[in-house]
Image (cartoon, rainbow, N blue to C red):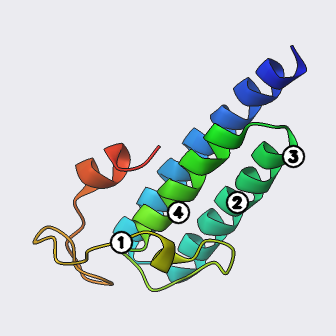
């Protein structure tokens, strides 16, 4: 029961931070992007601490997926572990065009 309550609590924060990340990327604000990534990283570790391993993996996939759209990297989430292709014609690293639908649906 404790895990269920923790999951409900953390998923609400995860959804909000995912939206904040998308907004920061749309604005091109590296500070807000870093803040959103830091919050997602915090949620990742909280999920692991609560035994929510699959949820933590989903958060990690969101972080890794966002690497297509910015140059900020978190040391705990190595993009080399995943084969990220930035060749998608709808995405440019630090560019002006971001496929929001892909980012929203992308990872977790």
Q: Residues within 10 Å of mark 1 (few under 14, many from 20)?
A: few
Disc 3 is placed on an element classified as helix
Callout 2: SS: helix
Mark 2 / mark 3, whichever is N-terminal: 2
Residue at image position (78%, 19%) is: 4
Q: Position of residue 61 (x, y in %)?
A: 50, 56
Q: Quadrant of the N terminus?
A: top right
44 up-or-down from 87: above or below: above
| SS under mark 1 | loop
According to the picture, the residue beneath numbered tag 1 turns out to be 83
Q: Earlier in the sequence, mark 4 or mark 2?
A: 2
Q: Residues within 10 Å of mark 4 (few under 14, many from 20)?
A: many
Q: Earlier in the sequence, mark 2 or mark 1?
A: 2
Q: Is residue 51 above or below residue 66?
A: above
Q: Which residue is mark 2?
A: 39
- Residue 91 badge: none
Which of the two discs, 1 and 3, sits closer to the camera?
1
Q: Give neighbour class at mark 3: few <14, some 14-19, many 20+ (Cα, 10 Å).
A: few
Find disc 3 in the rendering and name its residue: 49
Q: Which residue is mark 4?
A: 63
Left or right of 26, for residue 18: right
In primary-sequence order, the first of circles 4 and 3 is 3
Disc nearest the viewer among 4 and 3: 3
Q: CA distance from mark 1 to mark 3?
A: 27 Å
Task: Report the front residue among 99 and 30.
Answer: 99
Q: Earlier in the sequence, mark 1 or mark 3?
A: 3
Circle 2 packing at 10 Å, graded few (<14), some (14-19), many (20+), is some
């Amino acid at each position: 029961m404790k895990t269920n309550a923790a999951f409900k609590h953390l998923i609400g924060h995860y959804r909000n931070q995912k939206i904040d990340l998308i907004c920061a990327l749309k604005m091109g604000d590296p500070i807000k992007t870093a803040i959103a990534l830091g919050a997602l990283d915090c949620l990742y570790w909280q999920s692991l601490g609560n035994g929510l391993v699959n949820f933590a993996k989903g958060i990690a996939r969101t972080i890794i997926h966002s690497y297509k759209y910015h140059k900020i990297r978190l040391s705990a989430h190595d993009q080399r572990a995943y084969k990220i292709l930035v060749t998608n014609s709808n995405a440019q690293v630090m560019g002006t065009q971001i496929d929001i639908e892909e980012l929203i649906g992308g990872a977790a």
